[in-house]
Amino acid sequence: MARRAYHRRVSSRHHDVYHPANWIPPEGSWASSDAIRRTMLKNRNRDTAPEVALRSAIHRLGLRYRVAARPIPGIRRTADLVFPRRRIAVFVDGCFWHGCPVHFVMPKTNEGYWRPKVARNVERDRSTDAALHAAGWEVIRIWEHESVDEAAKFVEAVVKNRVSSRPRTRPPSPRR
Ligand SMILES: [Zn+2]
């Protein structure tokens, strides 16, 4: 399965001075309606509109998952959706915070502040990916601008193609 390059939305705990006025959401983005945008800004740590929409779509496909969970207890990174048995972590990445190549626009003011901040987020994303891969996890990153239905189908395909990491039945042990 071909992997697309994704970036993840980083928890807003680290971004107290985010000024949404600096960023214009892409046409058709979940964030493009003022109401949704306000909701996103109020509660940025989790349950953002893109995450909720993707979770619902994946749930409608009959898949079950954990929400906002740490894939690996020892690694302090939280994925938006986790399929523990298949070891798949899904991240929904906001276009601004994760430096979307299509939509990220550097704010006109305080570039010296924003540029390293977003760069650190992207670095952190890549280090999360590397840590999860090293532990045998599959990482899926979805941009907030992507179509919910397509993203949900993509996740479904990965889940269905991936062999469970913890088979329910063990192979019979050889008898003597
Ligand atoms: Zn984008």
Image (spheres, grey):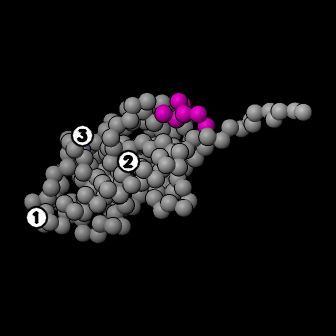
In the rendered image, residue 14, in percent from the top left (x then y), is placed at 33, 67
Work out whether residue 27 or residue 157 is closer to the camera in this orientation and state it.
157
As measured in the structure, the alpha-carbon distance from the residue carrying label 3 to the one carrying label 2 is 16 Å
**Residue contact between numbered discs 3 and 2, judged by CB atoms under 8 Å:** no
Three-letter amino acid code of the residue under disc 3: Gly
Which of the two discs, 1 and 2, labels the residue nearer the N terminus?
2
Residue 28's disc is: 3
Quadrant containing the C terminus in the rendered view: top right
Mark 2 residue crowding within 10 angstroms, few (<14) / some (14–19) / many (20+): many
Q: Is residue 174 visible?
A: yes
Q: Return the residue found at the far bottom.
A: 16
Residue topped by disc 1: 109
Q: Is mark 2 within 8 Å of ligand 1?
A: no
Q: Tell me which corner region of the image, top left, top right, bottom left or bottom right, holds residue 121.
A: bottom left
Query: Tag 1: residue type?
Result: Thr
Dot 3 or dot 1, earlier in sequence:
3
Q: What residue is rendered at 24% in x and 69% in y?
A: 17
Residue 22 x, y percent position in the rendering: 15, 59
Near-viewer residue (170 or 41): 170
Report x, y in % for residue 156: 49, 33
Question: How many labels, in total?
Answer: 3
Relative vertical location of residue 34 with respect to residue 17 in this rendering, above or below = above
Q: Is residue 43 above or below residue 86?
A: below
Ligand 1 position by quadrant: top left
Q: Which residue is mark 2?
A: 92
* Classed neighbour count for the residue bearing mark 3: other residues with Cα under 10 Å, few (<14), some (14–19), many (≥20): few
Q: Which segment is the magenta one? A: 158-164
Question: Which numbered marker is on residue 74?
Answer: none
Camera-nearest label, 3 or 2: 2
Residue 72 drawn above or below residue 86: below
